[in-house]
Amino acid sequence: MERVAMADLTGAAFVQQLRVRETAALRFEAARSGVLSWNTHAPNGRLEFRLVRAGHADGDWLPLAEWRPSGAKSFSPQHAGTRVDVDVIRAAQPFDGIEVRAQSVEFDLVAFSSPVHATPSLPYARDALILGVPAHSQYSTESEERGWCSPASLEMIHAYHGLPHSIAQTAREVFDRAYNGTGNWGFNVAYSGRLGLRGVVAHLANLDQAQRLLERGLPLAISYSWRDDELPGAPLPTSDGHLVVLCGFTGDGDCAVNDPAARNVRVVYPRSAIETLWQRNEGVAYVIAPVGIDYADVLARA
């Protein structure tokens, strides 16, 4: 029998439920877009969702993802003003809840995050804070290596948490057959969940919020893009989308980053440049944590 676990109305950009079976329901302030995360050890599953408005389900169940031991694929449905762009759910009209179902699947976690209003971080006012994240390059002998920034960043964080494995293995585990790539955000954090960690996609408002997670020992994979001359020291002239690991801050507040596309991987980028580029991509981050470390109070913002 299905068990529906209702979340409290938190007024947050991030809400989660732990340990639910088959069906979950999340409530939050009105949004027009967001990313769903799920962690489960179920070897097979098909995840569907429908939006909620004013406390009532509004629309049909739409497919989001399907996985089995042979691989996983996303869906990109479009129906009645709702569509999915690989991993981002978008709606023409605001919604304030989402229901999720997957038959015979027990979830360790189901979470939803929506973009927040970006606010500039305060001047950095503490000693250097840099976590010892192993530095691994996304470039190897594989033909797909140039698109492996996401699995490379994920693997570095897994290794930091004591679960090292190859970037090639990570790329295979997160590959989206429909998208034909390794950059599906939901699939990446789902793999962290299969390894016994907690993994969610979150939207952060600034580097101050990132700092609070780093102070808890949680490096972040952050997503951004840049054009000519926007990122001093960048490994490429431009990028339409890239992920790196934010490991911490120098004493001056600049960002200590493991950039899997950089020659030496560990680099320091100007704080203002990273914050501007990252927030232009809505402050998206992978938050990966061992079970028992509470990150939800940092992510849940009233």
Image (cartoon, rainbow, N blue to C red):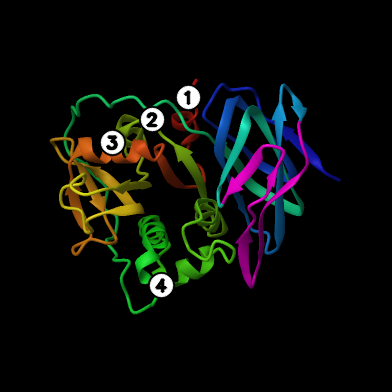
At mark 4, the secondary structure is: loop
The mark found on residue 205 in the picture is 2
Residue ID for mark 3? 276
Q: Which residues are magenta?
A: 58-85
Number of the label disc, if any, that sits on residue 31: none
The answer to whether 78 is drawn above or below residue 31 in the figure is below
Please rate how many residues cluster around mark 2, counting C-alpha atoms within 10 Å: few if below 14, some from 14 to 19, many from 20: many
Identify the residue under disc 1.
Answer: 301
Q: Nearer the viewer, residue 91 or 19?
A: 91
- Residue highlighted by disc 4: 144
Type of amino acid under label 4: Glu
- Who comes first in sequence, dot 1 or dot 2? 2
Residue type for callout 3: Thr
Residues under numbered marks 4 and 1 in contact, where contact means CB atoms less than 8 Å apart: no
Q: Which image quarter: residue 93?
A: top right
Q: Is residue 59 magenta?
A: yes
**Residue 293 % position (x, y):** 47, 40
Q: Residues within 10 Å of mark 4 (few under 14, many from 20)?
A: some
